[in-house]
Image (cartoon, grey):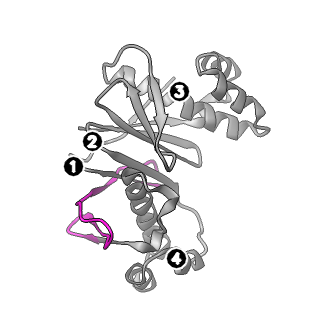
Amino acid sequence: MLKLFAIKNSCFDDDKRYEKYLALVDCARREKIRRLSVREKRNQSLAAGVIVPLALERLGFIGGVEIAYGEHGKPRLIQPEGLFFNLSHSGEWTVAAFSDCEVGVDIQQIKPADMRLADRFFAAEEREAIAQSDGAQELFFRLWTVKESYLKATGAGLSRPLNSFTVRFKGGGASIDDPLVSKHWYAVEVNAPAGYKIACCTALPQPVPNPEIINL
């Protein structure tokens, strides 16, 4: 099972809605949000705080939500049991992926990117693919989202450099060649809002989901 949910952060531009959902998040998240000086960042943090319980309701889970964090900061659900999740945000969207196995998700807004980042963060084969592509900017973000979702799924996070493994696109899918990991991981690209790319990575093969938009 792989389910994906999305919230448009700007839905919290409405002050009444903002205050309603701010009152529902835990005290630590509420104080974190209030310390942010930019409304856009407050909206983004609030979306990250409410998307998990709202998505769990839609998945049929009733009751409290308890989250812990791994060695490299990956969140995991203590309650409800037996379910894995991951979060990502970019631009005006926040997304959450849920699965019955380890999962990572990444969303990126497509905007002009400094291709020198590819020289710094991507493997040689990926850099060559970008150099030969007619759509270098789009390929850059396709690669970036798959790579980020993989590191988040494995729990490695920023402890692993992005250029320590290679992503290849073939046959309508993505494969990951990681010389340090023998386990096979499964990466998929997901339909994303216009101007964005989304990728998910899971420990087991899963059908590709369409994101469910949570309208408040």
Q: Report how far apart the C-alphas of labels 1 and 3 lie in the structure.
A: 27 Å
> Amino acid type of disc 3?
Val
Q: Which residue is at a point 41% across and 67% down the rendered structure image?
A: 143
Q: Report how far apart the C-alphas of labels 1 and 2 lie in the structure.
A: 7 Å
**Chain-order first, disc 4 or disc 2:** 2
Q: Nearer the viewer, residue 207 or 161?
A: 161
Give the structural element (helix, strand or loop) at label 2: loop
Q: Which residue is mark 1?
A: 204
Residue 55's x, y, as percent?
40, 27
Q: Which residue is mark 4?
A: 118
**Chain-order first, disc 1 or disc 2:** 2
- Circles 2 and 3, Cβ within 8 Å, touching? The answer is no
Q: Quadrant of residue 171?
A: bottom left
Q: Report the magenta residues as a range.
A: 169-198
Q: Which residue is mark 2?
A: 101
> Amino acid type of disc 1?
Leu
Disc on res. 50? 3
Q: Report how far apart the C-alphas of labels 4 and 1 lie in the structure.
A: 29 Å
Q: Report how far apart the C-alphas of labels 3 and 4 lie in the structure.
A: 34 Å
Q: Which residue is at a point 43% across and 78% down the rendered structure image?
A: 123
Answer whether residue 175 is magenta in the image.
yes
